[in-house]
Image (tube, rainbow, N blue to C red):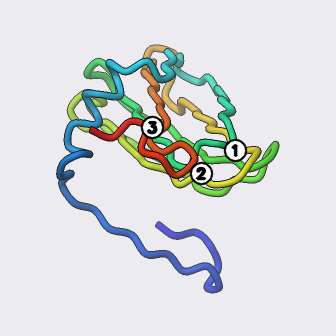
Amino acid sequence: KNTGSKTFPMNAACAYAIPPLSSAVKDIVTDNGGSAYIDGGAIRMYPFSAEVDQLQVLLKTDGKLLKAKIELLNGPNNVKQEYEVYASSGDVTSLFVVFETKGAGNSIRVKNLASQEYPLDFYWRASVIGNKDAGQR
């Protein structure tokens, strides 16, 4: 749902992934990118280098409820993009997002909106660094 004003329209699309993104969900878990375990109710923020032009992000659980918000920030509290996700099984229906992150001062903030007994796993990796393909296969 676009909650912005009429002056900020939005286009969105959804499709099954084709190579190289079809294997990216498995690859991001096994790569040497970043990962974090986030308890229910917790908020975590992770800055990344200005050289990163594209960032892949995965939120999943081990079959439990997934209820979270992920935000791409530019500066301390300037939200550029945000996604809120709810899934009854975060293993079967995880959230995989690719952010375009050109510029300096970017970071990712993850809010686990579920209660304490529903932790989530958060993975991220740079897929394009300085206009060079870094993680695509």
Of labels 3 and 2, the one closer to you:
2
Residue 53, image x, y percentages: 56, 49
At 64% from the left and 26% from the top, the residue drawn is: 44
Q: Amino acid at mark 1?
A: Asn
At 43% from the left and 22% from the top, the residue drawn is: 120
Residue 52, image x, y percentages: 59, 42
At 32% from the left and 18% from the top, the residue drawn is: 30
* Residue position marked by numbered label 3 in the rendering: 57
Q: Amino acid at mark 3?
A: Val
Q: Are marks 2 and 1 in contact (CB under 8 Å)?
A: yes
- Mark closer to the chain start, 2 or 1: 2
Badge 3: few (under 14), some or many (20 or more) residues near its Cα, within 10 Å?
Answer: many
Q: Secondary structure at mark 2?
A: loop
- Mark closer to the chain start, 3 or 1: 3
Badge 1: few (under 14), some or many (20 or more) residues near its Cα, within 10 Å?
Answer: many
User: Could you tell whether 98 is left or right of 21 in the image?
Assistant: right
Q: Secondary structure at mark 1?
A: strand
Residue 13, image x, y percentages: 32, 68
* Residue position marked by numbered label 1 in the rendering: 106
Q: CA distance from mark 2 to mark 1?
A: 7 Å
